Amino acid sequence: MAAQWDTSRYLGLFVSEATEHLDALGKELVRLEGGVTPEAIDSLFRHSHSVKGMAGSMGYEATTALAHSLEDLLDRVRTDPARLDRAVADVVLQAVDALGGHVKAANAGKPFPDSAALIAQLKELTHSIRPGTEPQPSASTPANAPLVESEGPREPELPPRWLVTLRVASTSAQPGVRGFLAYKRLSSLGNLFRCTPGIDEVKAGKLPNGTFTVELESSEPEAVVSKTVSQVADVALVSLSRVASAPPVPSAEEPKPAEPEPRVVGQEPPRTVRVRTELLDEFLDLAGELMLATAGVREVGRTLEETDRGRLNETVDRLHGLVRGLHDKVMKARMTPVSVITDRLPRAARDIARRRGREIELVLSGSEVELDRAIVDELADPVLHLLRNAIDHGVEPPEERRMRGKPPRGTVKLSVKRASDRVLLEVEDDGRGMDVERLKALAVERGLLTAEAARELPEREALLLSTAPGLTTATSVTDISGRGVGMDAVKRAVEAVGGTLEITSRRGLGTTFRLSLPLTVAMVNLLLVGLGDDVYGLPIAKVAGVVETTRASLAHSRDVPVLQFGSAVVPARELSQVLEVPGRPHDVDAVSPFVVVDTDDGRVALAVDALLGQEEVVLKALRRPLDQVPGLAGVTVLGSGRAVFILDVARLERPVRAAAAGET
């Protein structure tokens, strides 16, 4: 009896790889509804074939059966791409969702969902698409989908065969896993024949010199074969040569052609490995603690004699450089493109628009911009909620848009871009816009504001009333949104990672939600300033400069003190007053430092008692109740062991403006 192959150790790889294929399948299918091409249909087929192959290798019969039915449907559509209308796309997306449910069940160790009804629907639809018949045009067929004429039966063409030589890196921790994964990836391109050594030896990692060969029968070009192999970590394509399926017998007059030389594709690709996010978090924490410990050793060195101090400082400087390098490497490993979030939005936008009777064009840009993985993880749900709101409440139904002189198809734009040390993520729609006066009235009705305060509230802050729990201007409650929940969670999530939320809107023209986010939540360069006996940190990225002058020399504009900075003047305020903390008494004729900082509304000069130097520190998140205090971005610990609050200049903006305007 043959020994059973334990697949449990491959579960993580299966879940990861299958999820990638299903995400790509859903994303490409949504894009195809705007225009179908045979190449794109082939891509869909390969993704479904890969999922089927991986499920089969894991022994998941229910998943294999569902993926096989989906593959059959897509294979039939390949013969006539015009058949991929909206109805077929809906069923394919149902199958993708069901397969996703199977993958989640496998990961959780739970029974697979029953997909018998869906499999029957897929088979019925596959049977209805018979080759050689003209597709019946329908309203659901995309207008620009190409029609493929029936040409009758053809003599089948035999696809070419390739001899593929692969090498698994000697440093691979699981050579058998990587080799078998490459084997399965190649099987998605066509039929595999001889494998040398045998597939059981490949699974066991018994590879002479790390290499093995397979024969692949596929009509795919060489570039596709090469790309498919390159997607498997620790596996390199050594050579790829064409072999004849049935070589002809050469005649005496015609010499036998020489065997083609194997084509060397290139060097071994960079080796990669999947690492759990939690492990990276632990590495980052340890690297941060090492940096704090290094700063502590430096502080101790200041108490030593000059001769000993120099030797210690030299060693500490070298240690600091090594620790900083380690920290930077961990941070680089944590950086993740925003596409992790945005790749799933086209499918979500399609589903929401269909359910709400909207016509939507989703425009994505800047998805390649990278953020700390911790920030990306926290933003997935908030960004999806903003998209739902834009489609459900922002963009009008087609009939209403026509009445307003707008095109029936609404546009929702999501853009991401770098801005100095921040990342700006914007969700913009061209819909109704928000009713500021109605927001104020609802806030007064709920007791959140007095009528007088509502009248004096600037529009920018009035729009943020929509983030108050339970406050919504939606006229109807749907299963998508409209209950007044969500926007408060969006604001909390953005602020929890050190970001800010801003809303701008114009009635009848649309609304924009702007998220300003830090690149990372781990490290920050600070300018340390003293206020009385306390020390605070200002992010260097927000410091435009420092001016030392007397308070008596300040000019005034409308009774507001202003400071000359370069060719401009900026309002000058006492940082102690803005923070409402005690500061030292000052003689108006005494020279004091004024730190000029950048805010979203311009520059402000903040008077401090002393400048205490610059330091690179590890940012620690605040816990309740301190995370509710406006103007605090986090806390850090200096080498001396002293805790220092880090100020969030953007969140200090309102009290600074109020003080500069003479408000109480």
Image: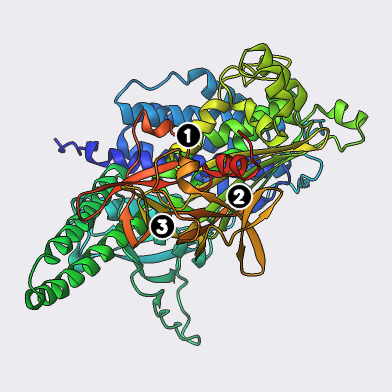
Vertical order, 88 against 567 (above or below): above
Residue type for callout 2: Asp
The mark that comes first in sequence, 1 or 3, is 3
Vertical order, 336 against 449 (above or below): below
The mark that comes first in sequence, 3 or 2, is 3
Task: Kindly state the secondary structure of the residue where label 1 is placed.
Answer: helix
Q: Which residue is mark 3?
A: 231
Residue type for callout 1: Ala
Task: Kindly state the secondary structure of the residue where label 3 is placed.
Answer: loop
The mark that comes first in sequence, 2 or 1, is 1
Q: CA distance from mark 3 to mark 2?
A: 43 Å
Quarter of the figure with the N terminus:
top left
Nearer to the camera, 607 or 208 = 607
Could you tell me residue 451's position as x and y percent?
A: 71, 18
Nearer to the camera, 48 or 251 = 48
Q: Which residue is mark 2?
A: 600
Q: Is residue 26 left or right of residue 537?
A: right
Q: CA distance from mark 2 to mark 1?
A: 20 Å
Could you tell me residue 346's position as x and y percent?
A: 62, 39
